[in-house]
Image: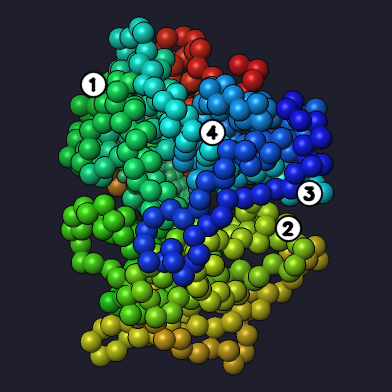
Amino acid sequence: MGKPTGFLEFTREMPSKRPAKERVNDYNEFVERLEDNKLNQQAARCMNCGIPFCHSGCPLGNVIPEFNDAVYQKNWAEAYEILSSTNNFPEFTGRICPAPCESACVLGINQPPVAIEEIEKHIIEIAFDKGLVKPRAPKVRSGKKVAVIGSGPAGLAAAAQLNAAGHQVTVYERDDAPGGLLRYGIPDFKLEKWVVERRIKLMMEEGVEFRLNANVGVNISINDILREYQAIILAGGSTIPRDLPVTGRSLKGVHFAMDFLKQQNKRVSNAEIAAEEILAGAKNVIVIGGGDTGSDCVGTSNRQGAVSVTQFELMPKPPAGRTDFMPWPTYPMILKTTTSHEEGCERHWAIATKAFVGDADGNLKALRVVDLEWAVAEDGRPARFVEREGSERDMPCELALLAMGFVHPQHEGLLNQLGVELDDRGNVKATEKNYQTNIAKIFTAGDMRRGQSLVVWAISEGRECARRVDEFLVGASLLESKDRSL
Ligand code: FAD
């Protein structure tokens, strides 16, 4: 442990952000980096607990006190080795993870927790700056071939691990660029795309092959894949958005959030936008859905020059001090105000959209909304809602963005053709222990198995799934698992 009294001497300090008024003029990341000596103090706050709950708070099982100690000692090479032994992509989680590890930090009981996410980002960026991150191609190849379908964080993590184990891995991606939601979903102001490209380049240098515009089940035959590969991982994400099939849904100006966000990612990287453009400029925008996707729509609409940005959440606002009120959008157990909200947004809670109202030309003009009242159960949690009498009204709106979550992966095409078994929610069925589907040699990981989740969970699933695939291919695996008993 670096400094036993560190947590008594130093308070939590976070890097500064560019002011909201300034940063809405571009799509660049806006969180600055802490100076090295300040980061060293932040790492010194770690108490090196006897039972480090942060290990289990992190879905990857990151060994946090150990890398905190290395940062305190300014031993960047060791910090990088420790961090990268459990996390293939700290540059992603260090930027966009909601940091469940910090919620698990024991110091957080009576002080602000250790700034673990910031330390993680710093370690990997310094490692890149110092040339410590080098391609590590396996010395021996196993002669086995694995296809990974989907290049999101789950597919990438599985590919990186299986490649390290010596298998020849090919990643199939239907989009024109790899990265899944990291590339076409999460806005550049949260994660600039050079960060994703830098990692993909490294993986290619290590021997992973990427096939783009390769939609398996559409322009790539699944039978060819089944013939060519000894194992297949389905990592296609959870892509079917929840709809709001009320009157006026087909009006011009009502769109799924992902169609809007993906176009903006493409615009920033000068990629071709094939569909009709969805733009928020000079419009009253209402985002329906209070989670991360909704928040990203808020930030993007402000950057596009919306006249007003309003966000709806069906659930009631949690009372102050109640951390167990609902799992989302307050996860991880705080009432979440994102950086996008800081940039300008009116938030409405306990509100429902009854209809989309249009003009004679079929353009959206307003949302017919109603306030909800929650009948509260005995334990204080919301139980059911009723419309508040007399609260129905029209709110001006020319662009409505539906950000109400994702129901399951796409079944048409790949999954139906394979005849893969689905669970009750429509996700691909496989246990968290073996990641194997009902079909021999086909595995699954990430949102496609777990349902809509987080980047850190996708990486964790990709890694654990890779270990099972490695065992399936060669009988035993030396790949790391978060299950320390393996
Ligand atoms: P995905 O990232 O969805 O990748 C799946 C890939 O598979 C896609 O590229 C898709 O094109 C490809 N694919 C699908 N079918 C086929 C096929 N048949 N052939 C070839 N390719 C195929 N999480 C966080 O932790 N922090 C955040 O800030 C955050 N923000 C988010 C913002 C938005 C707008 C959204 C939608 C999600 C956000 N998430 C966030 C959640 C996170 O992005 C996902 O949980 C994570 O990306 C899931 O990873 P995955 O690899 O399982 O799937």
Query: In the rendered view, does 230 fall on the left or right side of 276?
Result: right
Decide if residue 250 is in sight here.
Answer: yes
Query: Closer to us: mark 4 or mark 1?
Result: 4
Q: Which mark, residue 123?
A: 4
Coloring applied to the structure: rainbow
For the residues labelled 4 and 1, the Cα–Cα distance comes to 42 Å
Callout 1: helix, strand or loop? helix
The mark that comes first in sequence, 3 or 4, is: 3
For the residues labelled 1 and 2, the Cα–Cα distance comes to 51 Å
Whether 427 is drawn above or below 259: the answer is: above
Please name the amino acid that badge 3 sits on. Answer: Gln
Callout 2: helix, strand or loop? loop
Residue highlighted by disc 2: 323
Query: Closer to us: mark 4 or mark 2?
Result: 4
Q: Residues within 10 Å of mark 3 (few under 14, many from 20)?
A: few
Whether 162 is drawn above or below 182: the answer is: above
